[in-house]
């Protein structure tokens, strides 16, 4: 048994060595993982010390001496490991992100840390064998040492998983060769080598995604989603040699810079006008429709959102539905996998059992849960599509290539987000081929069709409305917080005739597209290249600024006086950090018709933007008042960094914001119905 443990230990250490070596060869910042592990190791060392001091007098049994020696040696070994990791952390604080020179001793420390993996794994293996043979010792002592051995293996496994997920086994070679790709274009051998590196990078990302989504059911659609996601990440990161903490530091700098620019910009002369009666009435009517349909869209999330909104009473209210067998009332509703969901859906919508035609919580990659309900107040058949709430949904989100939609209309350039398009096609098959819509309209033939959704569900609802327009010409769609990267320009213009989107505040999802993400990456790279502070100071300053605020003009950069005009110029140094031609990004000065892998996509329909009045407070989500206005899609062409970029996307925040629209009668700049601003 011991031989097997030691053999496995040697194999594990060899794999970790290859991973460390390949990573360090191309990236001097990969040691940041130690920040995650040091507190865990330190707490674990203190726990073992307390355990040994308390039970060392009860180790007078057979094998008790071995167990005592095991704990003493483990304490010494962990102390050496913690000291080494603290040294790595101290060295990591030197220099800046783009100046790794002061960290040149890092290679020695990394190899020392690597050498300590072997005795650590071997000692954990021997501890497992000795504790298994110490059946005559005090049960409490044995149980405590068993826990020690188990936790030791958990920490080792946790470290290995972090290395496998975070580190780049290609050692940053893709970033270096991607930045040099134009000079290699005429050399077939070098071009073939670069192509091989990119293929290997895609394979690495695919393995990472499969590891992170190991519990997702595997089928052809899942494999296609893994490939699409891996292609997206390998394309996005192919021209950079940054680690996650670099990106976090860049985001904190960008947050402060955006606040500074917003604070210092001169008041722009906005051409605004008091809307005419028709435009004002149109905005009021659409806001009323959004207020009415948003709870139904939120209900599509089922019991998790209900308990989130009612943390103290929600479980008690719907707990009986989870244990109760299906009643005759449930049999009236078609669907699958209702479980605990139906009770929460009824409470969130305020509707009756008989109003529901179909409820499905079937959830797979490219297959979204949805519900079909009769809304007698608005005389409509409502199809509500659920947004992102599972790993399968995330894979659907990340399948971000564009694909052509066969809509049977005269609209040119019918491109849409691939994953959401596949989800819309699934919904179309279920609603039309399975006769769900026919059943609904057989009950209420005079009603009109309304399709709604939130987040991912909003995108799927918008595409589904396109697909159903032929059979239901008067279809309407209400997309709550839809993703920006959804439709081509021509489809975006066409969708204004029947789709209304609602966006709250700084919500990141309506600003999220591959093009905007490339723009975000470019800004981050420029900021960190100009930064003259160590990364830990940037992160500490960013945490303070995010929690308590401060002066946004106090940017830790080499630029003078808060004048950020130089940041709009291309970064010419640090080829390992910034490549000038990213495969997924089209610079503003490139020809419009130049091919890209991920073309610019747009949000659906006319857009109502709810903006928070006054300065956006960090704890004002329950007291904020909002102003409603029609907005153009160009207002969402930049990702805004801030504390509410995620919370503004939550369904309960949208519901509260719609209830707190305070001055809809104010002068606003708005498009004509069906037109653009």
Image: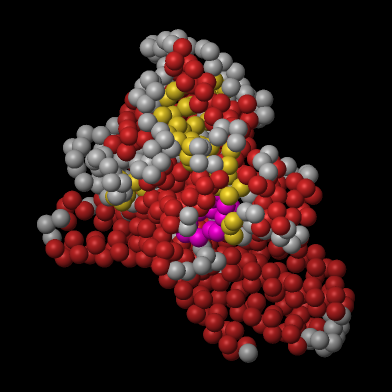
- Above or below, 675 against 51 in this view is above
- Where residue 352 appears, x then y in whole percent? 68, 43
98 vs 588, left or right, is: right
Residue 203 part of the magenta-drawn span: no
State the quadrant of the C terminus.
top left
Q: What's the magenta region?
A: 358-371
State the predominant SS element of the stretch in magenta: loop
State the quadrant of the N terminus.
bottom right
The mark total stands at: 0
**Nearest the eye: 424 or 614:** 424
The quarter of the picture where residue 61 lies is bottom right
Residue 370 part of the magenta-drawn span: yes
- Where residue 530 appears, x then y in whole percent? 38, 35
Q: Residue furthest left?
A: 186
Could one spot residue 516 in this view of the protein? no
Residue at image location 58% in from the left, 69% down from the top: 157
Residue at image location 73% in from the left, 42% down from the top: 310
379 vs 578, left or right, is: right
Residue at image location 24% in from the left, 61% down from the top: 194
- Where residue 510 appears, x then y in whole percent? 45, 37
- Where residue 587 appears, x then y in whole percent? 26, 38
Residue at image location 52% in from the left, 65% down from the top: 216
């Amino acid at each position: 048994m011991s031989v097997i443990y030691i053999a496995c230990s040697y194999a594990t250490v060899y794999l970790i060595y290859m991973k460390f070596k390949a990573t360090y060869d191309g990236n001097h910042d990969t040691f940041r993982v130690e920040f995650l592990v040091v507190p865990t190791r330190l707490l674990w060392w203190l726990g073992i010390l307390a355990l040994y001091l308390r039970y060392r007098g009860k180790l007078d049994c057979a094998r008790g001496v071995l167990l005592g020696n095991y704990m003493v040696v483990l304490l010494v070994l962990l102390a050496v490991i913690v000291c080494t990791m603290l040294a790595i952390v101290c060295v990591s604080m030197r220099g800046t992100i783009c100046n790794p020179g002061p960290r040149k001793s890092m290679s020695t420390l990394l190899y020392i840390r690597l050498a300590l993996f072997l005795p650590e794994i071997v000692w954990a293996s021997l501890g497992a064998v000795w504790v298994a043979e110490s059946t005559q010792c005090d049960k409490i002592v044995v149980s405590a040492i068993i826990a020690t051995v188990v936790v030791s293996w958990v920490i080792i496994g946790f470290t290995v998983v972090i290395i496998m997920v975070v580190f780049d086994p290609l050692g940053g070679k893709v970033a270096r060769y991607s930045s040099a790709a134009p000079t290699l274009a005429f050399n077939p051998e070098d071009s073939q080598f670069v192509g091989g590196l990119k293929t290997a990078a895609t394979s690495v990302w695919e393995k990472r995604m499969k590891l992170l989504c190991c519990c997702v059911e595997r089928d052809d659609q899942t494999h296609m989603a893994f490939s699409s996601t891996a292609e997206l990440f390998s394309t996005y990161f192919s021209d950079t040699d940054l680690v996650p903490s670099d990106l976090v530091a860049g985001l904190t700098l960008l947050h402060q810079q955006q606040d500074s620019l917003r604070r210092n910009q001169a008041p722009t002369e906005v051409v605004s006008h008091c809307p005419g009666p028709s435009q004002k009435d149109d905005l009021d009517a659409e806001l009323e429709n959004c207020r009415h349909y948003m709870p139904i869209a939120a209900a599509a999330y089922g019991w998790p959102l209900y308990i989130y909104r009612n943390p103290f009473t929600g479980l008690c209210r719907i707990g009986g539905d989870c244990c109760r067998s299906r009643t005759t009332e449930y049999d009236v509703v078609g669907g699958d996998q209702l479980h605990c969901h139906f009770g929460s859906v009824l409470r969130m919508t305020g509707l009756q059992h008989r109003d529901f035609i179909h409820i499905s919580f079937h959830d797979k990659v490219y297959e979204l849960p949805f519900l079909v309900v009769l809304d007698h107040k608005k005389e409509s058949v409502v199809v509500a599509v659920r947004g992102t709430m599972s790993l399968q949904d995330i894979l659907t989100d990340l399948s971000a290539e564009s694909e052509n939609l066969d809509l049977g209309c005269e609209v040119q350039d019918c491109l849409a987000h691939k994953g959401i398009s596949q989800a819309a096609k699934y919904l179309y098959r279920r609603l039309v081929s399975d006769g769900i819509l026919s059943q609904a309209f057989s009950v209420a033939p005079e009603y009109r069709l309304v399709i709604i959704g939130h987040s991912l569900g909003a995108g799927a609802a918008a595409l589904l409305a396109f697909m159903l327009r032929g059979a239901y010409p008067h279809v309407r769609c209400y997309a709550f917080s839809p993703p920006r990267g959804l439709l081509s320009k021509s489809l975006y213009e066409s969708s204004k005739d029947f789709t209304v989107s609602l966006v709250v505040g700084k919500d990141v999802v309506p600003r999220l597209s591959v093009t905007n993400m490339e723009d975000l990456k470019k800004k981050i790279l420029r900021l960190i290249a100009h930064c003259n502070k160590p990364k830990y100071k940037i992160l500490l300053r960013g945490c303070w600024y995010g929690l308590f605020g401060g002066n946004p003009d106090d940017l830790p950069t080499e630029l003078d006086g808060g004048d950020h005009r130089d940041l709009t110029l291309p970064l010419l140094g640090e080829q390992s950090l910034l490549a000038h031609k990213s495969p997924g990004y089209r610079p503003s000065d490139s020809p419009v018709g130049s091919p890209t892998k991920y073309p610019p996509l747009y949000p659906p329909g006319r857009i109502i933007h709810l903006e928070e009045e006054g300065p956006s407070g960090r704890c004002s989500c329950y007291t904020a008042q909002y102003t409603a206005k029609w907005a153009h899609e160009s207002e969402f062409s930049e990702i805004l960094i801030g504390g509410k970029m995620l919370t503004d996307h939550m369904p309960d925040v949208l519901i509260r914001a719609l209830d707190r629209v305070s001055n809809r009668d104010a002068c606003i700049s708005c498009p004509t119905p069906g037109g653009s601003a």
